Image: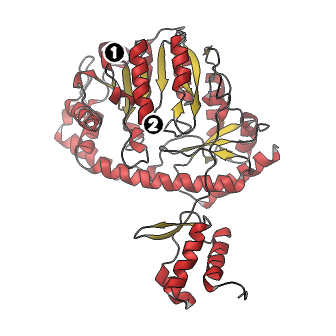
């Protein structure tokens, strides 16, 4: 032991070295204070001094009644490109490029960090199997029920309305059940806008939303978006006053790919702007239940007094993607959306509506959400730490407040799309940033799926991807 070091400093350095060598990885719990005292044959107060020193150094975090845990590297927040400037509305043209990337991402034996689906092991598959069997025995007629006009199952509507009580009153007559949240959004866009109209979107935004705008022959206006607080309402107000926008399409809770949550004050202001200018908002709230705050954030719909907000969601991210049951709280557009739904695809499966209603009726769903949130927080932190360790030092990472994706800003000279082919050849799939913009921005960004359980294979894939980024400099 060095003569000039106290016992607690020596212990802090020893544990710090184990953290640096990854014997204790980010998120791991250190041995208990009593165990360390007995193992090192030193006093409990000396161990406490060592751990407090490590806490001051930013190496560990204390959790009441749980112990000390290795801290994750502090994420570095990215800034959106051209954050101060509105671009002209533009027709979207990403479909061909997106299909090519998605096809490449399905290459055999690839490490799949591109597709953003929750992994099977954190979904309630066994619980759903039991629920499906119970509903099939109880109501076998639902397995053959088909209707062009009766598109909703009563108990499912009740459960959706009950969950909405957390943030306000809901008129059950404005609920339209759909085949997934994606169909809900598409129907809403068709109800509130026509070909050639301009839709205000976040920048960056989920590429499927851009696909829908493109397929409907509409234009997109990218609103500068802060990676922590969401779209600039000052920029949106300027666009509204200039008459540039006929509708908005935002993801206020856990935007994909940024993971940001719009502050409640901003949501309230946004609802006021929509009312003032009589502009509809299609609100994608599919990740709202997977936000990490102690209380679920309210949607913009909670502040809507004019019927201009059409809230779209589903339970696919937390229960099962296979049910393909979504819904929209369509406000003053309920009749138009219901008619479009009937004409487009008829009724959504009454059987799976009943299954989901059974699942939602008890405590299973809330338990599932608590489990998923804990797991996803840990997995995002683990991925963030690995990227920070493997990528160039000047890369910046998002700080997701919900969902399970990570947005990575690389140095300007790195082309995420050009790099994608090399990554596929090296066995790693991701989504290039260009796909999240109507105007081709975010060329030096990429999105990673953090939902999968951490494995040596994923850790090695991040290491290979980091080397590819460094080689591109």
Q: Position of residue 350 (x, y in %)?
A: 26, 30
Q: Do the residues labelled 2 and 1 touch (CB within 8 Å)?
A: no
- Residue name at image x 42 percent, y 44 percent: 290
How many numbered marks, from 0 up?
2
Q: Where is residue 73 in the image (x, y as percent from the top left)?
A: 62, 58
The colour scheme is: secondary structure
Q: Is mark 1 on a helix, strand or loop?
A: helix
Q: Position of residue 143 (x, y in %)?
A: 25, 33
Compare marks 2 and 1 and give the one earlier in the sequence: 2
Quarter of the view holding residue 89: top right
Q: Residue at x 53, y 20 (%)?
A: 236
Q: Is residue 216 visible?
A: no
Quick one: quadrant of the N terminus?
A: bottom right
Neighbours of disc 2 within 10 Å: few (<14), some (14-19), many (20+) = some
Quadrant of the rendered image containing residue 354? top left
Q: Which mark is residue 333?
A: 1
Quadrant showing the C terminus: top right
Determine the image quadrant of residue 424: top right
- Which residue is more in the foreground, 312 or 122? 312
Locate residue 228 relative to residue 465 in the image: left or right. Answer: left
- 132 left or right of 233? left
- Callout in the foreground (2, 1): 2
Observer able to see residue 445: yes
Which residue: 60% across, 45% down? 113
Q: Residue 263 carries which label?
A: 2
Q: Is mark 2 on a helix, strand or loop?
A: loop
Mark 1 crowd level (few <14, some 14–19, many ≥20, 10 Å Cα): some
Q: Which residue is farthest left?
A: 138
Estimate the x, y position of residue 92 in percent, counting from the top left: 61, 18
């Amino acid at each position: 032991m060095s003569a000039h070091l106290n016992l607690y400093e020596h212990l802090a350095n020893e544990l710090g070295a184990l953290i640096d060598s990854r014997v204790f990885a980010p998120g791991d719990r250190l041995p208990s204070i009593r165990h360390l005292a007995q193992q090192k044959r030193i006093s409990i107060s000396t161990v406490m001094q060592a751990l407090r020193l490590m806490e001051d150094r930013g190496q560990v975090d204390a959790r009441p009644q749980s112990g000390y845990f290795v801290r994750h590297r502090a994420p570095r927040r990215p800034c959106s490109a051209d954050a101060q400037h509105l671009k002209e509305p533009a027709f979207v043209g990403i479909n061909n490029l997106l299909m090519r990337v998605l096809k490449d991402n399905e290459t055999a034996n690839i490490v799949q960090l591109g597709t953003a689906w929750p992994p099977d092991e954190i979904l309630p598959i066994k619980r759903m199997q039991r629920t499906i069997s119970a509903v099939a025995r109880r109501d076998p007629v639902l397995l053959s029920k088909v209707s062009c006009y009766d598109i909703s199952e009563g108990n499912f509507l009740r459960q959706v309305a009950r969950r909405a009580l957390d943030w306000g009153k809901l008129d059950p007559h404005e609920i339209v059940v759909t085949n997934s949240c994606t169909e809900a959004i598409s129907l809403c866009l068709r109800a509130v806008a026509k070909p050639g109209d301009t839709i205000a979107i976040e920048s960056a935004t989920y590429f499927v939303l851009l696909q829908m705008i493109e397929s409907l022959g509409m234009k997109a206006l990218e609103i500068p978006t802060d990676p922590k607080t969401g779209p600039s309402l000052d920029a949106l107000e300027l666009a509204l006053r200039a008459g540039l926008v006929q509708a908005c399409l935002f993801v206020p809770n856990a935007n994909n790919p940024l993971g940001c949550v719009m502050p409640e004050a901003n949501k309230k202001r946004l609802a006021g702007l929509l009312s003032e200018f009589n502009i509809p908002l299609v609100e994608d709230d599919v990740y709202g239940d997977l936000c990490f705050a102690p209380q679920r954030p309210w949607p913009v719909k909670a502040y809507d007094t004019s019927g201009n907000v059409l809230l779209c969601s589903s339970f696919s991210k937390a229960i099962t993607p296979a049910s393909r049951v979504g819904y929209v709280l369509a406000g003053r557009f309920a009749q138009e959306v219901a008619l479009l739904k009937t004409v487009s695809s008829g009724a959504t499966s009454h059987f799976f509506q009943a299954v989901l209603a059974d699942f939602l009726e008890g405590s299973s769903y809330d338990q599932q959400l608590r489990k998923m949130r804990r797991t996803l927080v840990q997995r995002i932190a683990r991925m963030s730490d690995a990227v920070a360790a493997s990528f160039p030092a000047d890369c910046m990472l998002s700080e997701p407040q919900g969902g399970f994706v990570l947005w990575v800003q690389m140095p300007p000279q790195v082309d995420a799309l050009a790099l994608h082919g090399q990554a596929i050849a090296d066995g790693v799939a991701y989504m290039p940033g260009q796909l999240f913009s109507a105007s081709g921005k975010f060329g030096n960004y990429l999105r990673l799926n953090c939902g999968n359980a951490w494995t040596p294979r994923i850790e090695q894939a991040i290491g290979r991807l980091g080397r590819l980024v460094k080689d591109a400099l």
